[in-house]
């Protein structure tokens, strides 16, 4: 497998410096929001695609952007226009809600930037950082550290079933699995129940009372030690995986701290946070672990993008940058009209984001694993 990846990586760079023997144009459609609330994301993706074309430096590539307006009807209309132009492969749409009617365009293959994989049209391939890729990486960390008992906390949100699919696909070892309500008062009560907080709190009160009523000559010292604690009694898990993000993630970790579950004693693990810098300042919940793309590659890409456009890119733009290279590479190994068949076969590709594994119309990513500790981001593997 390693030899295969090296060969693909080498071939990819050869293609960057050599033009194709044939002069057939490589036409790639691009479906992004060019109007509406997500217009800025679309603009960033268009710029990233233009940057990729510049880096490839081959005038055989032609990109045809069309607007989705993040609406399913508009996306279908634009996809039909691309089809009428003879285009067979499309990067996009960006968002899951834009995919609804694309199964009507059976002659097109869509490389969507969504990370959702459930109920996709057969001609849509999810290229986002999906839950399976993330749980595969978390599983590697748990196994490497011989962590046997891990509980999983998943919010009752619109991506809940995606998380469950990723857990199942990765075959990660689950000690206990819980769903929680993100409403703060309900959340705190649920975390109390999950961690047996009231029992552990009562254990402490009972033990203090017992020692006070005892004849132990060292009871004053023991009582002072116990009074510094919040609970008494061990927890029956070693790690907790929290499938949440941003402020909601912080609410869950705060509730865990309140119930005397501490990251110095239990592993706090979450999903891909795209290097959210606000987490660096949350020292109480550190160390905090999560899978993500290669940080060095991402930083290098951000510098390249900023130098070209004098602005910071979105993380989705990096996906689109790599997908241009992926289509370019695959077009040299097969007729572009048959690319949909290539995505059914096992293949690998190395881009800026890392290594893609392609099989059965799915793209999984081999991710790195990081921890935040003492306000610093540290690569684990």
Image (spheres, rainbow, N blue to C red):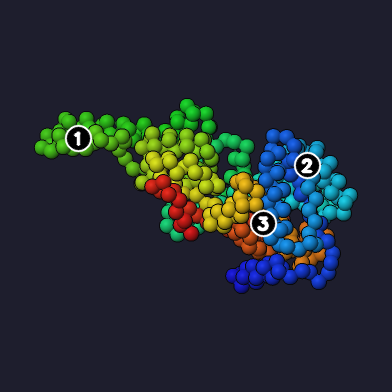
Q: Residue furthest right?
A: 84
Q: Name the secondary structure under disc 2.
A: strand
Q: Position of residue 230 (x, y in %)?
A: 31, 34
| Residue on which the image places disc 3 | 322
Which is more toward the observer, 294 or 296? Answer: 296
Which is more toward the observer, 122 or 368? Answer: 368
Q: Position of residue 374 (x, y in %)?
A: 38, 47
| Residue on which the image places disc 2 | 67
In this rendering, would 268 be left or right of 98?
Answer: left
Q: Name the secondary structure under disc 3.
A: helix
Q: How many marks on residues?
A: 3
| Residue on which the image places disc 1 | 224
**Mark closest to the chain's N terminus, 3 or 2:** 2
Q: Is residue 116 above or below residue 12?
A: above
Which is more toward the observer, 162 or 28? Answer: 28
Q: Name the secondary structure under disc 1.
A: helix
Which is more toward the observer, 265 or 74? Answer: 74
In this rendering, would 23 be left or right of 239?
Answer: right
* Quadrant of the snapshot with the N terminus: bottom right
**Mark closest to the chain's N terminus, 1 or 2:** 2
Q: Residues within 10 Å of mark 1 (few under 14, many from 20)?
A: few
Which residue is drawn at the image coordinates 67% and 46% (left, top)? 44
Q: Is residue 211 above or below residue 150?
A: above
Q: Nearer the viewer, mark 3 or mark 1?
A: 3
């Amino acid at each position: 497998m390693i030899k295969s990846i090296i060969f693909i990586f080498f071939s990819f760079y050869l293609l960057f410096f050599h033009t194709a023997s044939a002069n057939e144009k490589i036409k790639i459609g691009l479906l992004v929001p060019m109007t509406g609330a997500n217009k800025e994301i679309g603009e960033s993706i268009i710029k990233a695609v233009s940057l990729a074309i510049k880096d490839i430096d081959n005038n055989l590539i032609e990109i045809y952007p069309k607007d989705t307006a993040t609406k399913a009807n508009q996306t279908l209309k634009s996809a039909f226009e691309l089809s009428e132009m003879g285009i067979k492969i499309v990067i996009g749409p960006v968002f899951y809600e834009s995919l609804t009617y694309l199964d009507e365009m059976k002659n097109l293959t869509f490389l969507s930037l969504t990370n959702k994989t459930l109920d996709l049209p057969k001609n849509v391939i999810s290229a986002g950082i999906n839950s399976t890729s993330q749980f595969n990486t978390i599983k590697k960390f748990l196994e490497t550290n011989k962590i046997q008992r891990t509980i999983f906390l998943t919010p009752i949100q619109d991506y809940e079933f995606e998380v469950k699919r990723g857990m199942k696909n990765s075959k990660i070892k689950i000690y206990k699995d819980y769903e929680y309500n993100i409403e703060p008062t309900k959340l705190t009560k649920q975390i109390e129940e999950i961690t047996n907080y009231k029992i552990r709190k009562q254990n402490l009160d009972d033990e203090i009372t017992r020692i006070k009523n005892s004849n132990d000559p060292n009871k004053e010292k023991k009582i002072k030690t116990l009074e510094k604690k919040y609970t008494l009694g061990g927890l029956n898990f070693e790690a907790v995986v929290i499938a949440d993000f941003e402020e909601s993630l912080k609410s869950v970790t705060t509730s865990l701290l309140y119930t005397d579950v501490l990251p110095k004693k239990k592993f706090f693990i979450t999903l891909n946070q795209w290097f959210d810098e606000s987490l660096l300042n949350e020292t109480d919940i550190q160390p905090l672990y999560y899978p993500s793309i290669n940080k060095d590659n991402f930083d290098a890409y951000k510098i390249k993008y900023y130098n070209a456009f004098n602005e910071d890119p979105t993380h989705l733009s990096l996906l689109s940058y790599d997908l241009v290279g992926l289509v370019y590479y695959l077009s040299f190994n097969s007729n572009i009209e048959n690319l949909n068949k290539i995505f059914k076969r096992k293949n690998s590709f190395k881009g800026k984001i890392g290594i893609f594994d392609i099989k059965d119309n799915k793209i999984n990513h081999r991710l790195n694993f990081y921890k935040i500790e003492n306000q610093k981001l540290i690569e684990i593997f």
